Image (cartoon, rainbow, N blue to C red):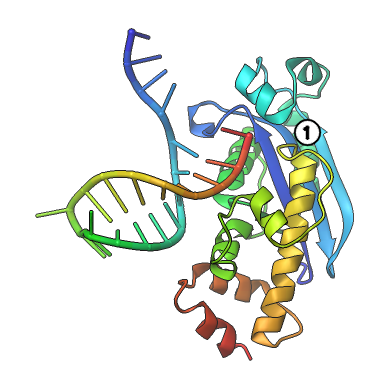
Amino acid sequence: MHADSLIILDFETTGLSPDKGDRAIEIGAVKIENGVVIERFQELMYPGRPISYFIEDYTGITNQMLGKAAPCDEVMHRFADFIQGQNLVAHNASFDKRFLDSELKRISSGYTGQFACSLLLSRRLYQAAPNHQLGTLINYKGIVSKGSFHRALFDAEMTAKLWLAMLDDIQQRAGIEQVPFSLIQKLSKATKANINKVLAHHR
DNA sequence: TGCCAGGCCCTCTTTAGGGCCTT
């Protein structure tokens, strides 16, 4: 497992529940190493049937665009290679993890990394934020954003910037120079009340 | 026609309900 690198990913999908037959339609991801984006992955994928008007409107991804895209199986093979051996991050990771697991199971593939969730971490660190939607947090942290939310690569890039901002804040609040993945997991499971104790313990 | 997720987290809690977040 690479200690200082990880993959930040985002799926666009036909709906909310892979258990009810929803499929991925786009995957976007960035690989971060030592605080810098060193690689990107972005592909549309054809889910085997038309998507709803709601999803076309929500994502800006149209049935026409998906008609030209490679099928999910093909794209997911490439993505499985991309994330090989890396820890993973997503905003509301339980959502993206369900789709990643579902799509990889269809091609009898998998991954070895662990997931961390930028949403859970932001709820601990930024308790004064108006809410913890990705777009709100980007504004809250004063991060410059130019592009379309609800497209996979853009959301992955924004999540990456938020992630790096959170690592900076953890470094300052804990007085440490490196933030191990294990501390991220510990902070994500902390309560709002004892977050400062968990940070102080690492001084 | 009717169905419509799941995990986290708070609280008027744990024999539960509902808001938040993701598409």
Q: Is residue B8 above or below residue A108?
A: below
For residue A25, say whether it is visible. yes
- Eyeballing the image, is A28 above or below A118? above
Residue placed at 59% from the left, 64% from the top? A121
Count neighbours of disc 1 (C-alpha within 10 A) and say few if under 14, some if 14 to 19, many if 20 or more.
many
**Horizontal arrangement in the rendering, residue A33 relative to residue A92 (left or right):** right
The x, y position of residue A161, in whole percent, is 78, 59
**Residue at mark 1:** A75
Q: Position of residue A55 (x, y in %)?
A: 64, 25
Q: How many marks?
A: 1
Toward the viewer: A176 or A123? A123
Residue A7 visible, this angle:
no
Front position in the image: A70 or A145: A145
Chain for disc number 1: A
Q: Nearer the viewer, residue B9 or B15?
A: B9
Q: Quadrant of residue A188?
A: bottom right
Q: Is residue A149 above or below residue B12?
A: above
Quadrant of the snapshot with the N terminus of chain A = bottom right
Quadrant the C terminus of chain A occupies: bottom right
* Residue A148 falls in image quadrant: top right
Mark 1 is on which residue type? Answer: Val
